[in-house]
């Protein structure tokens, strides 16, 4: 889950691996700051998002493919699995075409569950920029996914 999340932020498997590795190091070093063990998942995911963005800032490049494997639920029939796989590939393709800020903001919001304010702080942009980026990314994704209705 952490790799997939970092991969959607960075767009590169190598950068995602680096981000997750760094996230585990940071988490280990700051383990004493985790006040509620029930919130470990969100705490780790926040560290991953921060590290993924740091990797992007330091490398200033993106890979060509997102490379996430999306296995359909095991209980669905093969036709449904194929449809889900096609939808996920289409979504991945659309996400890869979004401008970097829109892709990052959408991923942090929709996958990471961060608030708009947290995204603004994470990306170091104004709150209004985050709102606009997410609105534009949602519109592009809705338009692009129309064929799957």
Image: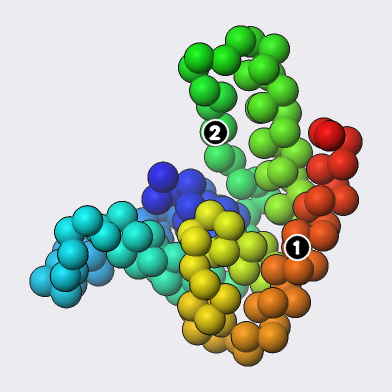
Spot the residue most to the left: 32
Residue at 16% x, 74% y: name it.
33
Label 1 neighbour load within 10 Å: few <14, some 14-19, many 20+ = many
CA gap, disc 2 and disc 1:
22 Å
Location of residue 40 in the rendering, given as x and y in whole percent from the top left corner: 25, 58
**Lower sequence index among marks 2 and 1:** 2
7 left or right of 35? Answer: right
Viewer-nearest residue: 126 or 54: 126
Location of residue 144 in the rendering, given as x and y in whole percent from the top left corner: 85, 47
Q: Is residue 52 above or below residue 141?
A: below
Location of residue 83 in the rendering, given as x and y in whole percent from the top left corner: 72, 23
Q: Determine whether the residue tagged by mark 1 lies in a helix, strand or loop.
A: helix
Does residue 21 show up? Answer: no
Does residue 54 show up? Answer: yes
- In the picture, the disc for residue 69 is 2
73 left or right of 31? Answer: right
Residue at 72% x, 43% y: name it.
91
Location of residue 81 in the rendering, given as x and y in whole percent from the top left corner: 63, 19
Quadrant housing the C terminus: top right
Q: Mark 1 sits on what residue?
A: 137
Spot the residue most to the bottom: 126
Residue at 61% x, 46% y: name it.
66
Viewer-nearest residue: 99 or 37: 37
Residue at 71% x, 53% y: name it.
95
2 or 1: mark nearer the eye: 1
């Amino acid at each position: 889950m952490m790799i997939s999340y970092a991969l959607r932020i960075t767009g590169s498997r190598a950068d995602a691996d680096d981000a997750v590795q760094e996230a585990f190091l940071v988490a280990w070093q700051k383990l004493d700051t985790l006040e509620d063990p029930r919130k470990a998942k969100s705490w780790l995911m926040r560290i991953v998002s921060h590290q993924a963005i740091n990797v992007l800032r330091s490398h200033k490049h993106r890979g060509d493919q997102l490379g996430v494997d999306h296995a359909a639920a095991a209980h669905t029939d093969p036709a449904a699995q194929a449809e889900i796989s096609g939808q996920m590939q289409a979504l991945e393709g659309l996400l890869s075409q979004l401008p970097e800020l829109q892709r990052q903001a959408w991923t942090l919001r929709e996958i990471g569950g961060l608030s708009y304010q947290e995204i603004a702080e994470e990306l170091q942009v104004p709150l209004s920029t985050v709102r606009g980026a997410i609105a534009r990314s949602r519109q592009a994704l809705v338009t692009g996914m129309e064929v799957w209705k």
